Image (cartoon, helix red, strand yellow):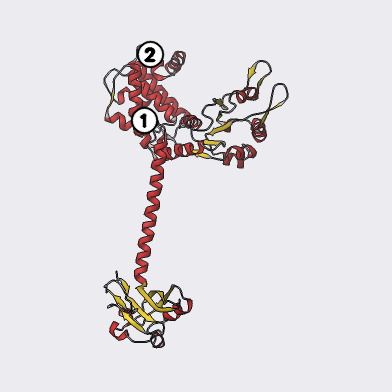
Amino acid sequence: MSIFSINPDRQFEIIDSSEEDLIVTNRDGVIVQASRISGRHYGVTPESLLGQSVYDLERQKVFVPAITPLVLKEKKKVVLVQETPNGTRELILGFPLFDEAGEVEYVISYSCEWSELVVIQGYLSELEAEMARMKEELTLLRREAAVPEGLVLASRPTAEAFARGLEAAELDVPILLYGEHGTGKATLAREIHGNSGRSEGAFLTLDCRTVPEALFERELAGEADEKIGMLQVAEGGTLYLEGIDRLSPYLQNRLAGWLKEKRYPSPEGVDVPFDVRIIASAEGELSDAVQDGTFSRELFYLIHLVPIELRPLMERKEDLAALIPRLLDEFCERHGKPRELSQPLFDYLMECPWPGNIDELRNVMERLVIGSREPVLGVDDLPMEYRVAAGSSLSDIGVDGRPLPLILESVEKRVLKLAKQRYKTTTEMAKQLGISQPSVVRKLKKYEED
């Protein structure tokens, strides 16, 4: 880059550079110095520029507009674009140099071709995008590093969900967790509580899907002289309302009133204030339920402050691949049966839809370990209903032209037939199939009669 130095008699030395286009003019607009590439884009040589007036060059359409007059007038840096006789565009920067009296004595102008700036701008835009991406990756890594050890968060959606939950844990506001049954909502709720300012308080769970409507208010508020309500026990802590979308409209409205007023009616008839953080979960999208009128709009806006979605296991292949060996090790250690997975079995487990998500996977992995006889587990060690699915195609089952109940009945019949061939007693069949022994007997009798 060119370097400027001013000697005692105010003359300039320009150390030339092939990459710079520099011109120095005095206060009268006369060019006193020019670098060796000056004038290249204007169709003139640097030697021909020396001693010329920029005013004359402007009238000759060489420098249009000239920057020196503007710098002399403004007495500060000026930036403009010039149209050259060659048809190109140049970006010009003009800088004033002042004398002892504070007047502009010289003007230094620097120019570069507009197309070069476009290239630089594109490069800077790409660099900015790359920096933003790296910043996002760094933020994600920091979030992942904050996630408690022991949880399987191999997939990006799961890691982001838990990271967002831990960030929201610091905010004392309600949180709404979305996702199918068995996707880890309860686990995330406990982690949020454990990382919040209420971690020293109680963490209680109320399953809205199973509690009878007549008992819901008593569970929360308690009964006179008999039972302390959950809101009182969870004071200063967290109450996890699992399956809040399963509450009746009446209970939704009652709960909305309590949460809005931060008070609940005691059995003695006196409203009692409470300080409890609410974490709720739902299997479906509540905004849709609000639109069709099946969920209270008021309750929705009270709990829908930090919505977090947990995806189904079948959409989290990285989590599934990490969970399978971890669960295998867990159940092998628990039951004292060291086992390994064959590659075909692992591949099959990776392709299963897992509608029951992690709960279903845990059940199958434990049944695999318990029911196995060989040290290496194969597809034949799967529970009977999964083994039939593993070896069947739609054509095997006979889907064409048959309603679903008949298809399911056909599959169930085949499962029972295979189980009867392999196991000696109905008790063992029931254990392997995960149903009761009377159910096995009843189903066998049904299909034998058929």
Q: Is residue 212 visible?
A: no
Percent x, y for residue 377? 29, 24
Residue that numbered label 1 is attached to: 323
Nearest the viewer among 111 and 373 is: 111
Residue kind at label 1, given as amino acid type: Leu
Question: What numbered label is drawn on residue 370?
Answer: none
Q: Is residue 130 left or right of residue 405?
A: left
Residue that numbered label 2 is attached to: 428
Percent x, y for residue 169? 51, 36
Q: Quadrant of the C terminus?
A: top left
- Nearest to the eye among marks 2 and 1: give it: 1
Helix, strand or loop at label 1? It is: helix
| Dot placed on the residue nearer the N-terminal end, 2 or 1 | 1
Helix, strand or loop at label 2? It is: helix
Hey, which quadrant is residue 364 in on the image?
Answer: top left
Cα distance, mark 2 to mark 1? Answer: 28 Å
Percent x, y for residue 307? 53, 40
Percent x, y for residue 111? 36, 74
Identify the residue shown where x is 35% and y is 61%.
123
